[in-house]
Amino acid sequence: MSGKKTFEVRLSVPFYDLDPMQIVWHGNYLNYFEVARAALFDHYGVDLYGYYGREGIIFPIIRTSTKHIIPLRHRDDIVVKATLADAHIKLVVDFEIRKALCGDVCARGRTEQVAVKTPQMETLFSIPDDIRKLLGYA
């Protein structure tokens, strides 16, 4: 593979993402990861939802992790970077959230997805060749 596939999105923290302590509720970091993950796949021509319609294969997330470093607050402008770490057996995406103005890293995370054939719900233990090719893992 030549170079890791990455993509960045810029977001502003909305009021409704805050908890009673006026910082972003921890579960909302996964929403930010999802926006960046979807943008990464779109950028490289991978439409997992459309793939389900064509091939009957879904890609559930089987594992997530988040390390919270600096809390996010209302109206923070942030950059969420998604980096594809692997696309052989599962889709592994690493994330970094940083403040747009100063570059301070606020959180890091990872998601893992597998390919599952429906309706049998059979785990395939390999990402389909056409998706791997689009992502540079063929």
Image (tube, rainbow, N blue to C red):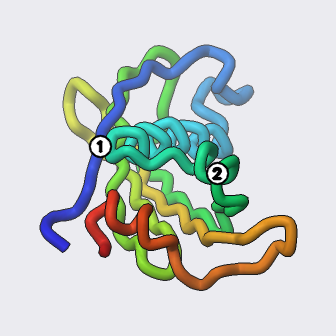
Judge whether 77 appears above or below 117 on screen: above
Using the image, tell me which numbered label, if any, was put on residue 7: 1
- SS label for mark 1: strand
Quarter of the N terminus within the rendering? bottom left
Q: Amino acid at mark 1?
A: Phe
- SS label for mark 2: helix
The residue at 38%/44% (across/down) is 45
Q: Marks 1 and 2, how far apart in space?
A: 26 Å
Indicate left or right for 55 with 97 as reference.
right
Q: Amino acid at mark 2?
A: Arg
Give the x, y percent position of residue 28.
63, 38
Classed neighbour count for the residue bearing mark 1: other residues with Cα under 10 Å, few (<14), some (14–19), many (≥20):
many
Residue 58 or residue 97, whichever sits in front: 58
Give the x, y percent position of residue 71.
48, 38
Residue 104 or residue 42, whichever sits in front: 42
The residue at 86%/66% (across/down) is 119
Classed neighbour count for the residue bearing mark 2: other residues with Cα under 10 Å, few (<14), some (14–19), many (≥20):
few
Which residue ends up furthest to the front in the rendered image?
A: 54
Which residue ends up furthest to the left in the rendered image?
A: 2
Residue 128 or residue 102, whichever sits in front: 128
Res 78 quadrant in image: top left
Tag 2 residue = 54
The residue at 53%/81% (across/down) is 126
The residue at 33%/40% (across/down) is 43
Indicate left or right for 98 with 26 as reference.
left
Residue 112 or residue 120, whichever sits in front: 120
Quarter of the C terminus within the rendering? bottom left
Judge whether 12 appears above or below 49 on screen: above
Tell which circle, 1 or 2, labels the residue nearer the N-terminal end.
Answer: 1
Res 101 quadrant in image: top left
